[in-house]
Image (tube, rainbow, N blue to C red):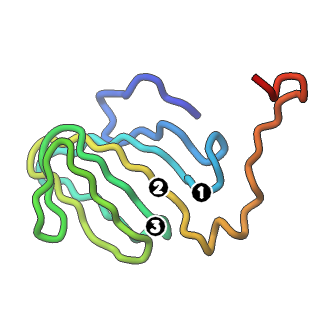
């Protein structure tokens, strides 16, 4: 699934899922949080990289603004809270103990098209 236009009426849109990426990446998501809205991080069994696109949020007592990035390791749960209307890009990746068990994702191009 690829969404090329973010739906302004939704606060969450999945841009890309694992089937289109390498085994290590679960998803890339866009979130539009309203002031006071919470987003739980680190409790889904995946590492998360959160990039603040617009607005401001707090995480574990630290304020984040546009351009800041937060890394939330799997298993270290915390809550991101929007302080203003905030848009984020969330990239979720599996921990090594999971990716070791997954088959490698290899592009399947015809042999004639594999070289530049």
Residue 12, given in percent of the width and then of the height, sits at: 36, 42
Mark found first going from the N terminus, 1 or 2:
1
Residue 105, given in percent of the width and then of the height, sits at: 73, 49
Relative to 41, is 44 on the left or the right?
right
Which numbered tag is attached to residue 92?
2
In the rendered image, the quadrant that contains the N terminus is top right
Q: Is mark 1 on a helix, strand or loop?
A: loop
**Between marks 1 and 2, how big is the CA–CA gap?**
9 Å
Query: Going by the picture, which residue comes out furthest to the right?
Result: 111
Relative to 57, is 77 on the left or the right?
right
In the rendered image, the quadrant that contains the C terminus is top right
Circles 1 and 3, Cβ within 8 Å, touching? The answer is no
Q: Residues within 10 Å of mark 2 (few under 14, many from 20)?
A: many
Circles 2 and 3, Cβ within 8 Å, touching? The answer is yes
Q: What element carries label 3?
A: loop
**Between marks 1 and 3, how big is the CA–CA gap?**
14 Å
Mark found first going from the N terminus, 2 or 3:
3
Q: What residue would you read off at disc 1?
A: 24
Taking the spot 33% from the left edge, 74% from the top edge, the residue there is 77
**Between marks 2 and 3, how big is the CA–CA gap?**
9 Å
Say above or below: 34 vs 37: above
Q: What residue would you read off at disc 3?
A: 44
Mark found first going from the N terminus, 1 or 3:
1
Query: Looking at the image, is mark 1 or mark 3 nearer the viewer?
Result: 1
Relative to 27, is 101 on the left or the right?
right
Say above or below: 97 vs 30: below
Say above or below: 19 vs 43: above
Query: Looking at the image, is mark 2 or mark 3 nearer the viewer?
Result: 2
Say above or below: 65 vs 16: below
């Amino acid at each position: 699934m690829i969404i090329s236009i973010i739906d302004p009426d939704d606060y969450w849109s999945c841009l890309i899922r694992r089937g289109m990426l390498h085994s290590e990446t679960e998803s890339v998501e866009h979130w539009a949080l309203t002031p006071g809205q919470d987003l739980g991080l680190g409790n889904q069994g995946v590492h998360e990289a959160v990039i603040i696109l617009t607005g401001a949020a707090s995480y574990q007592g630290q304020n984040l603004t546009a351009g800041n990035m937060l890394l939330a390791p799997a298993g270290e749960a915390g809550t991101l809270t929007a302080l203003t209307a905030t848009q984020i890009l969330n990239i979720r990746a599996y921990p090594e103990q999971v990716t070791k068990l997954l088959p490698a994702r290899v592009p399947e191009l015809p042999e004639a098209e594999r070289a530049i």
